[in-house]
Amino acid sequence: MKSSPSSPSSLHRKAPFLSTLLALIIFFIIIILYSEVFSFIFTQSHPKLSGSNYNSISRIIKRKKEKLAFAIGEREEGCDVFSGNWVWDSKSRPLYTEDCPYIQPQLTCQQHGRPDNDYLYWRWQPHSCSIPSFNATLMLESLKGKRMLFVGDSLNRGQFVSMVCLLHQHLPENAKSMETFGSLTVFTAKDYNARIEYYWAPFLLESNADDAMVHRITDRVVRKGSINKHGKKWRGADIIVFNTYLWWMTGMPFKILQKGSFKDEVKDIVEESTEDAYRMTMKSMVRWVKKNMDSNKSRVFFTSMSPSHYKSMDWGGEADRNCYNETKMIEDARYWGSDCSKNVMQVIREVFSKSEVAITFLNITQLSSYRKDAHTSIYKKQWNPFSPEQLADPVSYADCTHWCLPGLQDTWNELLFAKLFYP
């Protein structure tokens, strides 16, 4: 005999199904309610994290999960390695000696008679954290089969030489070499098949000051859109450290070759403000990096302006004086010299903030501004003889742009090391 649809046996068979369905309905109701609660709590705790801002945060989180090339760890939360002060450290300083054979005679201050040496013993200490000690073995192992390239002016060459000296003392004599090919200088660590290179390009773009040996030109001109003139030599580098600043500071509108070449008899040259000319170059650099560097395998750095100390009135000194005979650093934490253009810094910030490529900014300007004691001053090889009048007035020929080695630029490389391996 068949049971009717409403018979007890039929209802009994449907009971498990109805119970399961009811449980699922209750479960989904709870999920919906809790999701609303969590959403409310999250947006109330972080009112800015909604809509497009929330999407931006999501993109940041995704980027944070992506490991940068060469990174082996992370810095402490809130650690700004560029904010700090100089501390005396006679135990670990200097990091090498002037015996490093790769230092140009323009930078060997002790060998050229500098009577004091306190400038050698200062170490940069961030306020809220510490900089990892420079590890030459880690650097060499990481550069195995790779190229590290410094591109820019003579200040970037100083940083390149500092890096070479930090590494060379860990290499056997027959396992290293230094060669120069025009604008390119190459240090090779043979056992590691590693190359640390420097390329002379003071404007990054093609200019009339591109000769690596003869470039003392006051009427400076750069060619618009010409970064590939030099950039073809940079391709294939695994780490690039750019800088460009000093050569732009003429105090006058800057000349731009709009089209054609420097060989043309009639040149299409326009004048622009330093800031606009610099902005054009920064944008060219960013485009070159985007096109030529693989962010998954390589890293790009940009070193900020290196300060000079030609006006002692900037730090409360006497008029008509400069870094000559200065053996103490500037102690005012707010000090900013008149030689450092805040407008140019703003251009860098503007261009980099809009960039889609990862360029690590090495902000060495403020920490270096304190170091009026660390310049080569008169204690360097002089290429031309001075007149009796000049010799009687050392202030007139003191070099307050470049830095003694060993010295300040070793700190720049410690910061580069920190940013490379612990970003």
Image: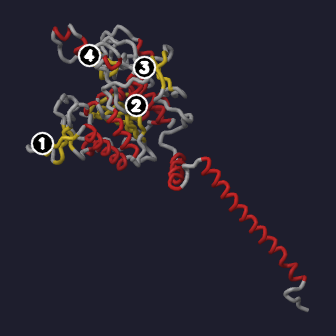
Tell me the tag on residue 263: 1
Q: Amino acid at mark 4?
A: Ala
**Disc on the earlier residue, 2 or 1:** 2
Q: Position of residue 141 (x, y in %)?
A: 48, 34
Q: Amino acid at mark 3?
A: Asp
- Residue named by callout 3: 332
- Residue named by callout 4: 398
- Which residue is nearer to you in this view: 399 or 288? 399
**Disc on the earlier residue, 1 or 3:** 1
Q: Amino acid at mark 1?
A: Lys
Q: CA distance from mark 3 to mark 2?
A: 42 Å
- Based on the displayed image, in which of its 4 quarters is residue 176 positioned? top left
Tag nearer the camera, 2 or 1: 1
Q: CA distance from mark 2 to mark 4?
A: 35 Å
Tag nearer the camera, 4 or 1: 4
**Placement of 27 over or under 15, stated as above or below:** above
Q: Amino acid at mark 2?
A: Ala
Q: Do we see residue 174 in this rendering?
A: no
- Which residue is nearer to you in this view: 136 or 283? 283
Q: Position of residue 287 (x, y in %)?
A: 33, 48
Tell me the tag on residue 189: 2
- Which residue is nearer to you in this view: 327 or 190? 327
Q: Secondary structure at mark 1?
A: loop
Q: Secondary structure at mark 3?
A: loop
Q: Position of residue 18 (x, y in %)?
A: 80, 74
Q: Tell me what residue is drawn at x 27 percent, y 34 percent.
A: 202
